[in-house]
Amino acid sequence: MIGPLEQQFLDRRAEVGPLWAVLLDPDSLPPQELAATAREVQAAGADLLLVGGSSAAPGVFESGMKAIREQSTLPVVLFPGSYHQVVAGAHGILFQTLLSGRNPQYLAEEQVMGAPRVLAHGIEPIPTAYLLIESGVPTTVQKVSGTQPLDRDDHERVLHHVWAARMMGMRWVYLEAGSGAQQPVPVELVRRVLSEGGVNLIVGGGLRTPESIRERASLGPAMIVTGNVLEQRRDASFLREFAQAVHGE
Ligand code: 1GP
């Protein structure tokens, strides 16, 4: 069943086109920096915040979440690297399965451990297949999860994963090149999945320029994710350019 937050995202997407999601990683920024980034990207036109990382120590997620919520009224959606990161304060969670991989821990175990925490904290789950796409050199998520990405040129096989996800009831698919990826998800692959996939599509990883975003956003995915680049640079005009690239302004 589609929850109110997911419906809000779908409505907004129908209204303004792809949503701009900014990924904040409590592993790499202290709470005051997370808070400042949240405030600034909201002012620039971000639509939601994703909060996630691959290895936050206990307590780091809680304090990061608190700082973000104090400075931003945007929807906050968990994008967890493990069930330990399912903490109170988030509105939603990309409840993900690493479907491109074959590691049972990330196909089922993390979800089983996370489910009671999602319920206990009253967080809205958004069922999402996470597909790691090969992007040049091995990425952190590949190493941490111990899985191989899908071949970036084998669009047929990526589509088979998307269809399987849809048939398993997942309404969202995240095509992920990996944080800091050398090469983002290919434009042609985004086009193909949009025309034949039948899911709400999220695209992220290695999107460092407004041009690279515009090329993909103009095809009409549901959401574009940026992370790393804003940890390095986030002056108002740069942020605004990103928002315009996603929203096709
Ligand atoms: C990573 O897709 C996100 O999970 C964002 O990637 O940090 O490269 O923008 P970047």
Image: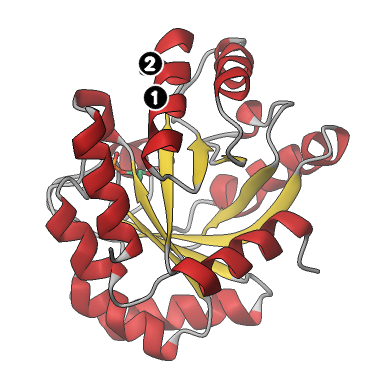
- Name the residue rendered at 69%, 74% in the picture: 169
Please identify, in this view, whether the residue under mark 2 or under mark 1 is nearer the observer. 1
Looking at the image, residue 217 lies above or below residue 199: above
Q: Is residue 194 left or right of residue 110?
A: left
Viewport quadrant of the C terminus: bottom left
Mark 1 within 8 Å of ligand 1, using the beta carbon: no
Query: On the image, numbered disc 1 is attached to which residue?
Result: 37
Residue type highlighted by circle 2: Leu
Q: Secondary structure at mark 2?
A: loop
Query: In this rendering, does residue 205 appear at all?
Result: no
- Name the residue rendered at 13%, 59% in the picture: 211
Residue 65 is labelled as none
Residue 29 is labelled as 2
Residue type highlighted by circle 1: Thr
Q: How far apart are labels 2 and 1 at the CA level?
A: 10 Å
Ligand 1 placement by image quarter: top left
Residues marked 2 and 1 touching at CB (< 8 Å): yes
